[in-house]
Amino acid sequence: MTGEYDPSPKTPSPVFCDFYNQEGHCEWHYKACGAPCMKTCRNLGGTCYHNLPGLEGCYPNCPEDNPYYNEETRQCVPECDCYDEYDNRYPIGYIMPSYSNDTCTVCLLKRFFIDEVCITK
């Protein structure tokens, strides 16, 4: 019937994904069955611990020179900041305090850390 509301789910248009792409870039792609586990700034290895069904929609396909998807900026990036156990973000080079002892951790590229003794004034 014409003009009546149709409650059935609609298939997203693959063309809609282009809305997320910056001019001259093609990172976002339509995936009918969802995306596999992605390398993100909060999941550097792209490891999934739960077998969840895929969700149809638009997903980033990060290139090799920007392999990590930054969930906060919604862009593919070459490196990520660090996050502590309370989800606080620390830029690369910053010192992350420990909540359990007197050591600090330095945020380095790709989340490799150097522990050192914190000096408080």
Image (cartoon, helix red, strand yellow):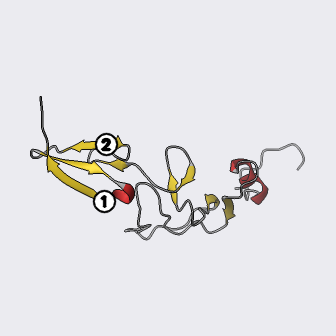
Q: Which residue is mark 1?
A: 112
Outermost residue, right direction? 2
Spatial CA distance of label 1 from label 2 is 12 Å
Outermost residue, top direction? 121
In the image, residue 4 sits, relative to residue 60, either above or below, namely above
Q: Amino acid at mark 2?
A: Tyr
Q: Which residue is painted at 71% across and 50% down in the image?
A: 7
In the rendering, at what x and y percent does residue 60 appear? 61, 59
Q: Earlier in the sequence, mark 1 or mark 2?
A: 2
In the rendering, at what x and y percent does residue 25 appear? 71, 55
Picture quadrant where residue 8 is located: bottom right
What crowding class fits label 2: few (fewer than 14 Cα within 10 Å), some (14-19), or many (20 or more)?
some
Q: Amino acid at mark 1?
A: Phe
Q: Which residue is painted at 70% across and 56% down in the image?
A: 9
In the image, residue 63 sits, relative to residue 5, either above or below, namely below
Q: In terms of depth relative to the viewer, which is nearer, 14 or 39?
A: 39
Specify the quadrant that holds the C terminus: top left
Q: In terms of depth relative to the viewer, which is nearer, 82 or 120?
A: 120
* Left or right, 8 with reference to 72: right
Q: In terms of depth relative to the viewer, which is nearer, 25 or 87?
A: 25
